[in-house]
Amino acid sequence: MSYDENISISSFEPDDLYRRRVSHFAHLDVCVGDIIMLGDSLINCCEWHELLGDCRVKNRGINGDTVEGVRQRVITIMNSHPDKVFIMVGINDVSHNIAPEVIAQAIVALVDYMHELSPVTRMYVHSLLPFDASYHYSTLAGKEAVVTSINCVLQASASAHHYTYIELYDHFVEPSSGVLSAVYTTDGLHLTGCGYALWARLLKPYLAE
């Protein structure tokens, strides 16, 4: 089954910064045995290989990326048949006012497509993280339930679509308010070093599989 183009959830128009990042990746090799961190700014803003202590880990995150953006650039990654791919994408789609079920369906379809390109690659999908729109992310205001709805679908779909779901949300949310804990952010969306350190601790057992 090939990727269903009808699941493309938004028109994707990359800016110059995005194109430069894609061009940069085109000159970097992905090899059999590599571990790819794939997604948006939450992936891009971390030195994963250093944090995880594993030189096989390669960062393929781009600020502002969406599910459709990842789909458009994933062929070159998967054609090299990496060992594992860890995906974090979707929060920018949430900010574009797309329904949670549509976003979740697109993420699952993306994983199916990646499986087709490289059946030997093990796929891991992170839950979306909580956020705190009170800082300055007005496009996310009132959309906390959208994120939790997407996460529910991603978790429920994991077995049937042959990926491992990684629960991050519960570790980062402030229970009393339902937003991203201030311990882990300075802007309500992106993570501090403390936040990435927690993410790394949660991720390491999956690297060892």
Image (cartoon, grey):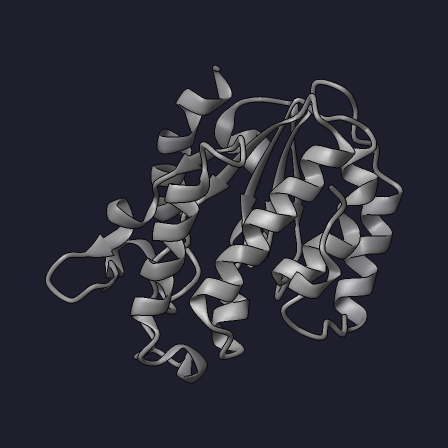
Q: Name the spot of residue 101 as percent of width and height, x first.
A: 45, 63
Q: Name the spot of residue 208 as percent of width and height, x first.
A: 48, 15
In the picture as drawn, the residue positioned furthest to the bottom comes out as 138
Please name whichever residue, 116 or 173, is drawn nearer the observer in this view of the structure.
Answer: 116
The quadrant in which the N terminus is found is: top right
Q: Residue at x 52, y 65 (%)?
A: 102
Indicate whether 157 appears above or below 133: above
Please name whichever residue, 193 or 94, is drawn nearer the observer in this view of the structure.
Answer: 94
In the picture as drawn, the residue positioned furthest to the top comes out as 209
Total number of numbered labels? 0
Q: Residue at x 73, y 50 (%)?
A: 3
- Left or right placement of residue 183 versus residue 92 in this view: left
In the picture as drawn, the residue positioned furthest to the left comes out as 176
In the picture as drawn, the residue positioned furthest to the front comes out as 1
Q: Name the spot of residue 145 as percent of width and height, x first.
A: 30, 68
- Can residue 192 be seen in the rendering of this structure? no
- Left or right placement of residue 174 versus residue 203 in this view: left
Indicate whether 25 appears above or below 138: above
Q: Residue at x 62, y 59 (%)?
A: 67
- Left or right placement of residue 126 versus residue 21 in this view: left
Q: Residue at x 78, y 51 (%)?
A: 73
- Can residue 204 be seen in the rendering of this structure? yes
Q: Name the spot of residue 132 as percent of width and height, x first.
A: 31, 70
- Left or right placement of residue 155 versus residue 99 in this view: left
Please name whichever residue, 64 or 167, is drawn nearer the observer in this view of the structure.
Answer: 167
